[in-house]
Image (spheres, helix red, strand yellow):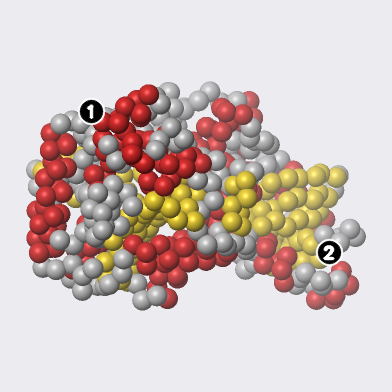
Amino acid sequence: MRPVIERESEQVRQRREKLEALRAQGPAYPNDFRRDAEAGELQARYRGVTAEELAAQAPRVAVAGRLMARRVMGKSSFADLRDVSGRIQLLVRRDDLPEGVYAEFRHWDIGDIVAVRGTVFRTRTGELSVRAAEIRLLAKCLHPLPEKWHGLGDTELRYRRRYVDLITSEATRETFRRRSRAIDCIRSFFVERDFLEVETPMMQTLPGGAVARPFRTHHHALDMDMFLRVAPELNLKRLVVGGFERVFEINRNFRNEGVSTEHNPEFTMLEYYQALADYEDMMDLTESLLREVTRTVTGSGEVEYQGERIDLDRPFARMSVRDALLQHVPELDPAVLEDEAASREVARSLGVEVPDGAGRGRIWMALFDHFAEQRLRQPTYITAYPTEVSPLSRCNDADPFVTDRFELFIAGREIANGFSELNDPDEQAERFRAQVDARGAGDEEAMHYDADYVRALEYGLPPSGGVGVGIDRLVMLLTDSASIRDVLLFPHLRPESGA
């Protein structure tokens, strides 16, 4: 029995009646048609070819796609056919078709998937078209297509029924074409620089590589709890230990945290690691990467994001966390930042929540997140992150309070995070122990102690740099998308009631 998800409208009922009539005649969903041309290909092939030249050539083609519009005029009709490549017009005439086919065509619905064999020609108005000698229905569309999507409720429906959004919105289709081009460009960029693309496990016995709350699952055959990957970092650095000195991975990560216009529980990251490099080398590499991807995807080194021009052609600005705080928090002075009690008091007086037990480094970052991050509009590297909040980063030789780490901000949003890797196994073990203590004090995002990773470091990790880039946020920038849900084909949503 067919499940009823929602009350059928009168239009749906009528379309189902047509489907039942088709079933009575034979196979309602045939799969024996093969096209030899696409709409966009035809538009390109015959661009500039005159009506007279086309009439002399009379090229015959087989096309298929979705019926998106129809204009019935007695014994002939014009229709719009759209496939993956674009749109082409059809001319459907009663006298050109077998007996009764034109009458059937007139009862088909917008959204139906049809197949056409015919001749390419140009109309009196100059529009390239296909004159149908044969037309068939391949698949019935049982729901009327919306003409417009607008308003909050419809926005959520676009996410829930992405298939309908893709049918009706060229802008949505272009967003995901750009996403695909961006990922393709990223792969080419690293392969050309002798990086090896690798894959690391998505299920792990210990979550690691990021300060984040993981998703937990259970492996029944092994009778053991496992975690969905929060980051591939530790496994990628194991590979560098093993001798793969340049590696990258485009991966899916999972973090059991909040949902917002910038966060989705499941998201795509790019991570890359290079031996005999430091965080400054990785900043240079990341800048070159983002500039090349932007130019490839948009055709320019500048993008417009939510009404603001973002220039990725200019050298990216660089400043330390400390300098960013002094610039964006007028109430601070250098002496306050050097004193934990004074910085805590200033933070609380400014309405900034400071976690219990937070040291000076975490206080700095609470102030930074509150005051500075949103003001970093043009591409800006923030460097010298406190060691307290950087458990995998190498300490700065001149000032061990901070690490050789950076984050890249564009349009007030973190795009990348990178650092010189901590490769001292004893120091890494001590950092892990501090994270375990933090977990014991109630920090659910603190890391676990990974004894095998420490053992890997004991075999020797070359001095290295590593970076993680948020693919979803980068695509938001390249497509002028306000929400991360706009660049995910299937964003996470609560189930529909009654579904």
Q: Residue at x 12, y 59 (%)?
A: 425
Task: Please state, as top left, top right, bottom left or bottom right, where the C terminus lies in the image.
Answer: top left
Q: Residues within 10 Å of mark 1 (few under 14, many from 20)?
A: few
Could you say whether the residue bearing mark 1 is in a helix, strand or loop?
A: loop
The three-letter amino acid code for the residue at tag 2 is: Arg
Front-lying residue, 89 or 427: 427
Q: Residue at x 50, y 25 (%)?
A: 6
Residue at the spot of label 2: 122
Front-lying residue, 4 or 270: 270
Please state if 355 lies on the left or on the right of 91 as rendered.
left
Q: Residue at x 66, y 57 (%)?
A: 86
The disc placed on residue 356 is 1
Front-lying residue, 418 or 366: 366
The three-letter amino acid code for the residue at tag 1 is: Asp
Residue 448, relative to residue 156: is it above or below? below
Task: Please state, as top left, top right, bottom left or bottom right, where the N terminus lies in the image.
Answer: top left
Residue 151 position, x and y percent, is 61, 29
Residue 101, relative to residue 122: is it above or below? above
Could you say whether the residue bearing mark 2 is in a helix, strand or loop?
A: strand
Comes first in the chain, label 2 or label 1: 2
Snapshot quadrant of residue 494: top left
Please state if 163 lies on the left or on the right of 235 as rendered.
right
Q: CA distance from mark 2 to mark 1?
A: 74 Å
